[in-house]
Amino acid sequence: MSKGYFRYFLNKLVWLFITAVFAFVLNFILPRLMPGDPVAAITARIAQGMSNSTGMKEVYEQYATLFGTNRPLLEQFFLYVRNVLQGNFGSSFSQYPRPVADILKSSILWTIGLQFPAIIVGWLIGNTLGALAAYLKKGFDKVLMPISIFISNFPAFGMAIILMVIFAVDLKWFPTSGGYGFDMIPNFSWDFIVSVIHHYQLPFWSIVLIAIGGQAIGMRSMSIYELNADYVKYSRFLGIKDSTIVRYVFRNAMLPQITGLALSIGTMVGGALVAEIVFSYPGLGYTLLNGVMGQDYPLISAVTLIITIMVLLANFLIEIAYGLIDPRIKAAQSE
Amino acid sequence: MGKIMLEVNELTTKYITRFGENVYAVDHVSLKVEEGKSLGIAGESGCGKSTLALSLMGYYFAPLHYTSGEIIIDGQKITGMDPDDIRRKILGKEIAYIPQAAMNALNPTLKIIHFIEDVIHAHDPKATKKEIYELARERFAILGLPEEVLQKYPVELSGGMKQRTVIATSVILSPKVLIADEPSSALDVTSQKMVIKMLKDLMEKGFVKAMIFITHELPLLYNVTDDIMVMYAGQIVEKGTAREVVFDPLHPYSKGLMGAIIVPESGVRNVKLTAIPGTPPNLKNPPSGCRFADRCKYVQPECKVRSIDFRDVGNGRAYRCIFSEEQLRKAYQNG
């Protein structure tokens, strides 16, 4: 690692830290700016049927003390920082007394299991199609492009709902909601795995299809640009084989696409939101929606914190890795 | 008379536009370059110089297409050969090309040595990396390029260094004929000088046996090449030795080009620069008579009607005009 590159690395690290601090503060404050009092809502739920207003007040006070909502915001913040650093995200308001960490643990795997393969598959298929369209041109390009543009401009919820209506409601090939059969308990039996795979298809393809369209368009235009680059002509005139030139072109066209891949992996959780909500898939997105509905500050903060950290890390890693892959960036960094 | 290295007879190539129109950018061009000689091709932009350079390679790809004529390199006719054979056996090996814009001529994500490996492997798959490195190192040393350049990416090189690297790479297989398309036009004077010196070295050290040098800078041609051809609207309008064409131009277009040169020497400070009015004709439908007629000071009614033949005045000197040598000289004396 050269000295210049190391300095660049440190610089990026410092910025990562500064951004993380700001994001952390916002993560804490923003949910708490929502109108309404979650403790009151919990009290109302717990004290159902209770007519004694002194008793209600007592219950309210008890929960307010428990959650710390009666302390000044600044004090709450420092308590929160201390707890988070110890890996404690507090208890959920809406699913009290379940700890937030526990809720996250059970939902994050669903999200990663749904999103990660979907992003990778969509990226691979999309880039291959885009590269082929640029290289083959003619009919293939003329068919693929309009379809890609059409699909990539679909709103995510639209795609999810269309797939649901066609394949779940009309054709009844797949279930409409959930991550597994509602009458099952998660375990490692065959029945359960089959049920998971069955429930997996629609949310998975609703994400993949949209990703394919966007990636294909990007890769196609990058490839066309590279195919017309001067170095392609020059390489041909030196007698270099077409297979070698195609390798040059697609490697160079791929570089910006790698940024796209890393970014979508980073924003995975946010991206999952819509597909998970439409299909009531038990992932982070669905959890976040529940948290927002229940004014569950600790849960919202924790989920958004995970999203923030993933986005920041993904960006950081791209910038670091990019410098190693692309000599042009490396040269610019070292200056 | 030395051995003829490159012979071109009545070569015609055309561009096919996306509307299906034919544009004949090289129109029945014939030329000969002997071993150890260099030929300069001059003309203003848009006159077909660069297209001629591409056409001479014998390998065509859209939008440029071969129409008729022949190219013979050292006795071997390459027109009519299978394009794949040309690619493998001729390009880079028998005839090499130096592009106008060296800035973008190299794949930005490939180290120079790896590019050279690809060039050599295209013609000799058995060459080992070690052999290639040795050859490249030796060749770069002879041509005054530092060995470190081999391990660098194109972005790490300055413009002049990049151009010289491109030249050294083009001739790595010691081609018989080198086509240099404005190799120094985009460079500052110092780099230009180094590039010119390098091209001269190539000839002297026998890395290339004959050279075609294309530029719009006539004084440069006079210093570098043995013979000069002047091109206008896809046709050769005059040819002769460098001295003849520069100091005693016959064709009114050549005369006009010489008048438009800025020479920063004492005594010429107050000489008025003359420009040739107008622009070259649109080659989609070239004029039926002399193509220069519309811009010519000495135009006759006849010029616009019949096509004008080459007038051979001996010793390889020829020009395309209805006037005789005496008539033209007299006309130039009278201004």
Image: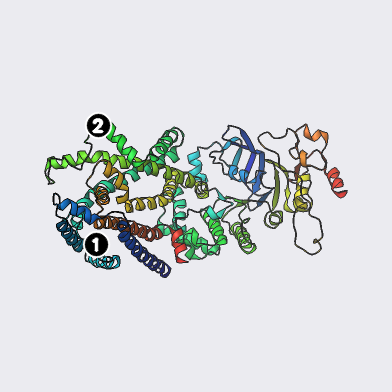
The part of the image, by quadrant, that contains residue A36 is bottom left
The residue labelled by disc 2 is: A169
Q: Nearer the viewer, residue A290 or B65?
A: A290
Q: Chain of mark 1?
A: A
Q: Measuring from the top left, give residue B216's x and y in whole percent.
A: 68, 51
Residue A80 — which label? none
Q: Chain of mark 2?
A: A
Nearer mark to the viewer, of 2 and 1: 1
Q: Nearer the viewer, residue B22 or A79?
A: A79
Q: Measuring from the top left, give residue A74's x and y in whole percent.
A: 30, 67
Tag 1: residue type?
A: Thr
Tag 2–tag 1 contact (CB < 8 Å):
no
Q: Measuring from the top left, give residue B329's x and y in whole percent.
A: 84, 47
Distance CA(mark 2)–CA(mark 1): 45 Å
What SS does tag 1 mark?
Answer: loop
Q: Is residue A175 left or right of residue A241?
A: left
- For image coordinates 32% across by 62% down, the residue present is A24
Residue A241 visible in the shown view: no
Mark 1 crowdedness (10 Å alpha carbons): few <14, some 14-19, many ≥20: some
What SS does tag 2 mark?
Answer: helix
Q: Is residue B325 above or below residue B265?
A: above
Mark 2 crowdedness (10 Å alpha carbons): few <14, some 14-19, many ≥20: some
Residue A69 — which label? 1
Q: Nearer the viewer, residue B218 or A143?
A: A143
Q: Is residue B98 left or right of residue A311?
A: right
Q: Measuring from the top left, give residue A12's x and y in whole percent.
A: 39, 65
Instruction: Give the mark count.
Output: 2
Q: Nearer the viewer, residue A298 or B315?
A: A298
- For image coordinates 52% across by 46% down, the residue present is A233
